[in-house]
């Protein structure tokens, strides 16, 4: 019972202390509100000046479609995840830097450092789309950097696609040649069959020519089917290349630095600095209140006498 009563008493005393502490804090702020306001104003002004000194960055972004290979079933040139990973490779970034005439050694060039730092790509889940973004020191620089990055990927995909497209075009040309030969042979056999029908040739010769005509017709149908398939592959590959979907988006205002963020940080720093100054003056006030005024005057007079003796 005694312990329970003691615990409840301490709890009650603790609850009574908290309001008193809050009153002390508010009284201290009232006494030194000018110091707190000055610290906040100075910190906010310094933050605004720092924000104005930091170079502005514009962000350009676009959605990139990954092209297809002339294969069945439909196959991407590379997966969207692999394409997004390319943008993080230093070799790829070097190619982008070369495309915009930036030094690849980015140690002393802020534009090259910004390009490497902000070139980002994210693959769409279960799609052939990649979101690409990059920053520049102006809207024009941002668009130029983004165009260079996209064209670097397009060039890499075109190099991978080129031999397959050449093979497809060769197959189309071969198909056209075989089709021409098959049609010519068919026409020739039809002429022969017509001549045979009007002559006294044997019945077996007619059957042979008709059999050859049937084979040529079957070959022509197969060539027509092959031509349709190859044409669809060619059309599909040309219709869905690696390219930007829609337009490049660049906001009118710079994305960074953020003025609101700088001002918020300034307010926080000002509050912390102001509260520190208030604690300092409150401690001085508490010390002064503990020492009687007569003692303080005597200490001051003693200090002045000592100083005069030294002089």
Image (tube, rainbow, N blue to C red):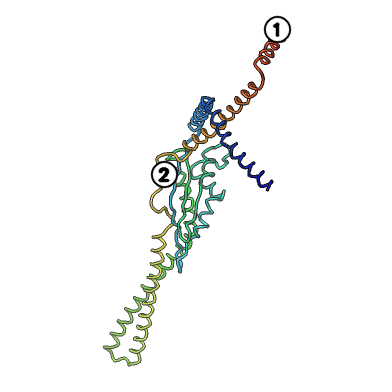
> Residue, x 34% and y 79% (percent of image)?
186
Q: Residues within 10 Å of mark 1 (few under 14, many from 20)?
A: few
Q: Is residue 200 left or right of residue 28?
A: left
Residue 284 versus residue 217 in the image, above or below? above
Q: CA distance from mark 2 to mark 1?
A: 72 Å
Q: Quadrant of residue 196?
A: bottom left
Question: Of the residues under marks 2 and 1, which one precedes in the sequence?
Answer: 2
> Residue, x 56% and y 50% (percent of image)?
89
Q: Quadrant of residue 29?
A: top right
Which numbered disc covers residue 270? none
Residue 110 location (% of width, % of height): 53, 37
- Judging depth in this view, the residue of 76 and 31 nearest the camera is 31
Q: Is residue 158 left or right of residue 231?
A: right
Badge 2 marks a residue whose secondary structure is loop
Residue 172 versus residue 212 in the image, above or below? above
Residue 20 location (% of width, % of height): 57, 34
Q: Which residue is mark 2?
A: 250
Q: Tell me the quadrant of the picture where the C terminus can be found.
A: top right
Q: Quadrant of residue 14?
A: top right
Badge 1 marks a residue whose secondary structure is helix
User: Total label count?
Assistant: 2
Extreme residue in the front direction: 1
């Amino acid at each position: 019972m005694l312990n329970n009563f003691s615990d409840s008493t301490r709890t009650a005393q603790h609850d009574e202390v908290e309001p008193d502490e809050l009153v002390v804090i508010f009284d201290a702020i009232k006494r030194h509100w000018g110091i707190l306001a000055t610290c906040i104003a100075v910190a906010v002004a310094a933050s605004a000046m720092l924000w104005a000194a930091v170079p502005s960055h514009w962000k350009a972004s676009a959605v990139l479609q990954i092209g297809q290979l002339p294969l069945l079933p439909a196959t991407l040139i590379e997966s969207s995840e692999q394409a997004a990973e390319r943008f993080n490779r230093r070799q790829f970034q070097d190619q982008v830097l070369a495309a915009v005439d930036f030094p690849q050694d980015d140690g002393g060039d802020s534009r090259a450092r910004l390009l490497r730092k902000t070139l980002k790509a994210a693959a769409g889940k279960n799609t052939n789309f990649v979101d690409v973004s990059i920053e520049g020191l102006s809207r024009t620089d941002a668009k130029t950097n983004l165009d260079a990055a996209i064209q670097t990927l397009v060039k890499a995909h075109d190099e991978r696609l080129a031999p397959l497209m050449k093979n497809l075009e060769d197959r189309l040309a071969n198909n056209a040649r075989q089709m021409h030969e098959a049609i010519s042979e068919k026409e020739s056999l039809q002429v022969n069959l017509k001549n045979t029908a009007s002559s006294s040739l044997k019945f077996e010769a007619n059957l042979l020519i008709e059999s050859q005509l049937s084979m040529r017709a079957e070959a022509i149908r197969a060539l027509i089917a092959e031509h349709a398939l190859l044409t669809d592959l060619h059309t599909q590959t040309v219709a869905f290349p690696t390219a930007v979907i829609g337009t490049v988006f660049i906001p009118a205002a710079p994305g960074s630095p953020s003025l609101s963020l700088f001002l918020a940080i300034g307010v926080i720093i000002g509050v912390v600095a102001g509260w520190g100054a208030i604690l300092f003056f409150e401690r001085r006030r508490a010390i002064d209140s503990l020492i009687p005024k007569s003692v303080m005057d005597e200490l001051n007079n003693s200090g002045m006498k000592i100083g005069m003796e030294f002089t």
